[in-house]
Image (cartoon, helix red, strand yellow):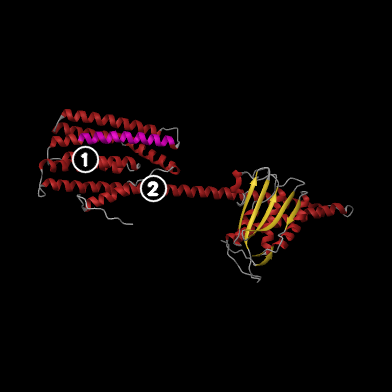
Amino acid sequence: MHIETPNRSRVDTPILRRIQSRLRVLFPRRQLPVEHSRRLKQQMHDFSGGGVALFWQRQGIYAGAGFLCGFYYSWPLAALCYLLIQVADIFDSVICHSVINRTDHSLRHSHKLLKRLFASNAISAASIATFTLLLARLEGPGEHFTSLFFLFAAGLFAAVNNHQLKQVLALRLITYGALFIYIPASDILAESAPFTSKLWLHFATSLFVLYFVLECSTIFLRMYQRTLDQMDELRSERDKARESYEIKSQFVSVVSHELRTPLTSITGSLTLLRETNLSKDPEKSDRMLDIAHKNSKRLSKLINDLLDIQKMEARKMVYHFAPVDLGQLLNDAAQSITPYADQYEIVVRTAPPPYPLTIRADHERLMQVLDNLLSNAVKFSHQGGYVELTARLVDGCAMLEVRDYGVGIPETERHMVFGKFTQVDNTDCRNFDGSGLGLSIARQIIEDHGASVDFDSSLGEGTRFYVVFPLCDTEENISIELPTS
């Protein structure tokens, strides 16, 4: 909505409008958020480091300005102002050293130091403004070349060297800018100068020079902000590289462990079968063959998981969709997992829906999902316990649930559940085998079916995984290739 405001008596020139625009760019009205504490610390350190490095350069400038003022105008005024500026500059240097040598890096302490920097620079800007104002009074109307040039130099120095902190830069530019306008404007008022007077020319020239200082401030500020953004990008890329390296290391560790164990068993079994006459002990022979067979299946599952991950990342996973009855799916999944559950003395209890529930899905892929969910439930259950597999209608959607009453998942490790090559029990001496790929694959398959998966867990009480599917309204079989999202 645009609201017209009444006309007011004001000076509206293109230069003033450009100055106002630059001020909005330089100093937007916003607070420093907590998440930018690291950047604030960097800005304060850069600002303070520059202030300390330029100490002797400022001393030379102050000494030169004081000498010119004393030689051509008044030695007492020059000495007084020089002393005032020195006190302010020393105080500012002390604060800069305290920022550089800080030991407390908290955000609260950063804000505390920022206030001190603001106060010290306010005193410094006020002392310089006082010196130039008194010098302008000595010069007289229309003779302000020296005082205005000193202000211009101070503003340009601030634009070049104080751009790290917007608050301090704004303080100095506003102080010098106000005085830059006040000095020629006060001459116009004192002399009641007409528009044809050169005093108005001096005023317009002051506006032009002030705009130039603001333009320089904008350039240096943007350059510094761009540098900080590039540093943040470099840090982000560095963190991503470290994360990728850690994932790679974890991948090598997990896969080597999961490959080495079954391969060792298979190699040992086959070596015994080849080098030992087992005809006299057929039971031992059968046992060796059974060990080799089980570990071959384990090795095959790991390789299949790795291939599935590769297909999903390459968006080449193929699904054959058709109507699937959830009651029959539950029975197939329970029968498939029962031999594995028997090893842990776990009973798989099923609760099929009281009426047919049909979804459109890939039956084999859903069996893979339930196999992963059920095997995890069995693996993390207490010996002699049971696992529940149910299906029901919830808010017009079909819901599959796999519930165990085992160790549970800590809330602090919730983010690891669906990760690749990660397990909740992710230590060097794990109590549970697995590559850490099963749940990641299961979630991707479920999402490719247009469904969702989540879980609830209580540490020491068990975990419930649930998958929500849209119901199927047709019975036509469809076989398509669906790219993973």
- Dot 2 amino acid type: Thr
Whole-percent x, y for residue 416 in the image: 60, 48
For discs 2 and 1, the disc positioned in front in the rendered view? 1
Count the numbered circles shown: 2
Q: Which residues are magenta?
A: 108-131
Disc 2 to disc 1, how far (Cα)?
32 Å
**Pointer 2: what residue?**
227
**214 or 289: nearer the viewer:** 214
Q: Residue at x 32, y 34 (%)?
A: 119
Whether residue 11 sits left or right of residue 451 in the image: it is: left
Residue 289 in view in this figure: yes
Residue 123 in magenta stretch: yes
Residue 142, above or below 347: above
Picture quarter with the C terminus: bottom right
Residue 249 in magenta stretch: no
- Dot 1 amino acid type: Leu
Residue 477, above or below 432: below
Residue 423 in view in this figure: no
